[in-house]
Image: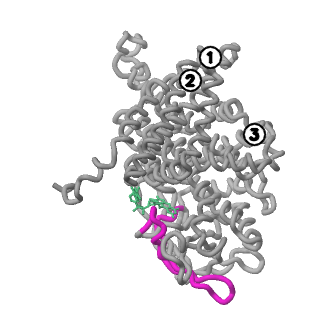
């Protein structure tokens, strides 16, 4: 596995130059501590932890994996010690509520940490990552007593959390889940059922694990309107708040899987386990959405991390590996051959990874700023506007970034030729680890239905307009800028076409609802490329201005501009295919009777 080096220059570019984090943080409620110096210091320290502690453990986790026994799950060598260091450093409490021991810094800062930790070692990063989602759910929906009991322990990192939704017969369709919760006389509930694929469901890093579980109350309506949410700890809290007696929750086994071997994927059995309701009865799925939005942005980071790690590894290799001569004549005449970075096709692979990683960083940090505003905007108007944009951008970030992040990880492997397929270099681990991103937290297909059906068509296009209006404004403001023409013109065209395509699908859907499902993934991918075009055009503008000023970091800004140019000429045209296929209609998909598939 390539040694991870946190891309601090680009992180700062996105935070400071593209998204003006200083003004953003200054405009949030209770974010006084997020001063530029503090933010900088945190990122520097976080980078050291990711590079020095987590990155070396990435291949170890892959090779050793987790081991199950009746006593529990043992994580790979070094994982527990790294977790202890993480806790000692105060990292779990960074963006958590100060009333329960948190440091109260904005969530977007936590996202930067998650990027660095997750890129260095995704399997390890999932343990605190899931905990973070569980913390958010209890913060948003728990009672004061639940917060005092669980949040303080989870925020300090002494206990971790999980997300228990999936059952053997249902993952996407949670309306059919069967785990039961029977009320007890003391106000608690007894939960019975089996959850599968529970990430970080059992491990040896902490003394207690707090499961957030979806289950049904007796007589609850069928479908999604009859699901409630519960806290079910592995160990019941004792009088003094410590982890007390074992609850009737156990890990029945762990899965053997394609990647993320260092993260335990568990079957969790609830055998009359004691739990407590969070939020109102039968509104569990609504409460869970808090958890899911955070988790979806968290999963989007996996796409960014896969692209970044693949890029770092393959760039170093492409500069050293010698093969054949450049088509225009030797570039390394004294060597037996030229380094492969001279070949146009190798550059295509490198630049795709770079454009994906840097574009993904811009999109994730933008989304994270919206999440900050939802939590801490100073006015209700700003909060509402951010909430609408967050809802619109989340499925795009989750599905588009994990899809193209996986493509980028594959290209990283391809740059290595046959050596990429060999474990030693770590590129095949990166591909295997990245593959799950398109599946958990809602598959690409489910995210696409959420985007096109729920977010766009059900709001009569309002959520789309809230974004395209911003793009339109940017295009208008820069319409006369000759130097930006190569970016602004195609961006304006895409922005207009996006609305037109949406209207056409909406019209088709009025005649036949299947048209939504037939168009949705192409629509989502198109939307992802359109959002990237906006972000890349904005980044190109900053780079051009800096270059015109004669900035001392000429190399950094020219690279930014050249990558923007690559994106517009070699990636954005993919929208042509998506535009055509999203309008190709449902008939070609549905005409074939099921029996004919096997002929
Ligand atoms: C390593 C790993 C870790 C996981 N971690 C967790 C965890 O921590 N907690 C947890 O609760 N779950 C977890 N999961 C479960 C994961 O979220 C589910 O596997 C996922 O949501 C898909 O559900 P499913 O496997 O039941 O597939 P299904 O829902 O059966 O879907 C199968 C296929 O059908 C498609 N499909 C289904 N319905 C539709 C539709 N209406 N329209 C179009 N296409 C559709 C899907 O896109 C998919 O391609 C994990 C899974 C894995 C493998």
Q: Are marks 2 and 1 in contact (CB under 8 Å)?
A: yes
For residue 24, the mark is 3
Left or right: 34 as drawn, with respect to 221: right
Q: Around disc 1, counting alpha carbons within 10 Å, would you say few (fewer than 14), some (14 to 19), or many (20 or more)?
A: few
Read off the residue under disc 2. 488
Query: Which residue is painted at 59% across and 46% down in the image?
Result: 463
- Disc tally is 3
Please report the residue visible at 46 percent of the width from the left and 23 percent of the height from the top: 569
Q: Residues within 10 Å of mark 3 (few under 14, many from 20)?
A: some
Does residue 189 belong to the magenta stretch? yes
Q: Residue furthest bottom?
A: 185
Q: Which residues are magenta?
A: 170-199
Nearer to us in this view, 57 or 9: 9
The tag on residue 481 is 1
Q: Indicate if the residue with disc 3 has its beta carbon within 8 Å of ligand 1.
A: no
Q: Quadrant of ligand 1?
A: bottom left
């Amino acid at each position: 596995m390539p040694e991870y080096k946190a891309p601090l220059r680009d992180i700062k570019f996105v935070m400071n130059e593209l998204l003006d984090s200083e003004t953003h943080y200054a405009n949030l409620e209770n974010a006084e501590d997020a001063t530029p110096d503090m933010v900088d210091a945190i990122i520097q320290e976080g980078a050291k932890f990711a590079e020095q502690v987590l990155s070396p453990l990435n291949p170890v986790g892959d090779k050793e994996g987790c081991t199950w026994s009746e006593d529990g799950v043992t994580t790979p060598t070094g994982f527990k010690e790294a977790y202890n260091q993480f806790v000692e450093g105060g990292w779990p409490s960074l963006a958590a509520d100060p009333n329960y021991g948190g440091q109260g810094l904005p969530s977007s800062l936590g996202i930067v940490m998650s990027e660095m930790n997750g890129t260095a070692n995704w399997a390890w990063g999932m343990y605190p990552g899931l905990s973070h989602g569980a913390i958010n759910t209890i913060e948003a929906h728990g009672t004061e007593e639940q917060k005092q009991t669980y949040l303080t322990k989870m925020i300090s990192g002494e206990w971790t959390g999980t997300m228990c939704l999936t059952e053997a017969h249902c993952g996407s369709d949670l309306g059919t889940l069967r785990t039961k919760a029977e009320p007890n006389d003391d106000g608690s509930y007894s939960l019975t059922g089996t959850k599968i694929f529970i990430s970080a469901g059992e491990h040896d890093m902490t003394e207690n694990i707090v499961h957030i579980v979806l289950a049904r109350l007796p007589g609850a309506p069928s479908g999604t309107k009859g699901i409630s949410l519960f806290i079910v700890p592995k160990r019941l809290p004792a009088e003094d708040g410590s982890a007390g007696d074992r609850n009737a929750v156990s890990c029945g086994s762990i899965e053997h899987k394609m990647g993320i071997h260092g993260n335990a994927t568990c079957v969790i059995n609830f055998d009359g386990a004691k739990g407590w309701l969070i939020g109102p009865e039968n509104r569990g799925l609504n409460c869970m959405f808090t958890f899911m939005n955070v988790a979806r942005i968290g999963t989007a980071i996996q796409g960014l991390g896969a692209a970044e790690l693949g890029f770092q590894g393959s760039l170093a290799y492409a500069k050293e590996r010698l093969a054949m001569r450049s088509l225009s004549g030797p570039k390394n005449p004294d060597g037996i051959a030229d380094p492969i970075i001279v070949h146009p096709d190798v550059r295509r692979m490198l630049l795709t990874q770079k454009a994906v990683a840097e574009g993904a960083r811009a999109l994730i940090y933008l989304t994270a700023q919206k999440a900050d505003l939802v939590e801490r905007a100073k006015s209700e108007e700003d909060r509402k506007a951010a909430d609408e944009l967050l809802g619109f951008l989340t499925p795009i970030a989750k599905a588009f970034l994990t899809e193209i992040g996986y493509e980028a990880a594959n290209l990283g492997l391809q740059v290595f030729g046959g050596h990429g397929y060999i474990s030693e270099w770590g590129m095949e681990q990166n591909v295997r680890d990245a593959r799950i991103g398109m599946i958990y937290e809602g598959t690409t297909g489910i995210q696409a239905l959420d985007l096109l059906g729920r977010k766009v068509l059900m709001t009569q296009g309002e959520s789309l307009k809230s974004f395209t209006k911003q793009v339109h404004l940017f295009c208008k403001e820069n319409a006369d800028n000759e130097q930006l023409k190569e970016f602004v013109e195609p961006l304006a065209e895409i922005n207009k076409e996006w609305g037109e395509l949406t209207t056409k699908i909406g019209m088709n859907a009025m005649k036949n609802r299947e048209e939504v499902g037939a168009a949705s993934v192409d629509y989502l991918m198109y939307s992802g490329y359109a959002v990237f075009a906006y972000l890349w055009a904005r980044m190109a503008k900053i780079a051009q201005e800096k270059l015109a000023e004669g900035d001392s970091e000429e190399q950094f800004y020219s690279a930014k501009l050249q990558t923007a140019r690559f994106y517009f000429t070699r990636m954005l045209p993919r929208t042509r295919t998506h535009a055509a296929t999203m309008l190709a209609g449902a008939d070609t998909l549905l005409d074939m009777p099921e029996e004919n598939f096997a002929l």
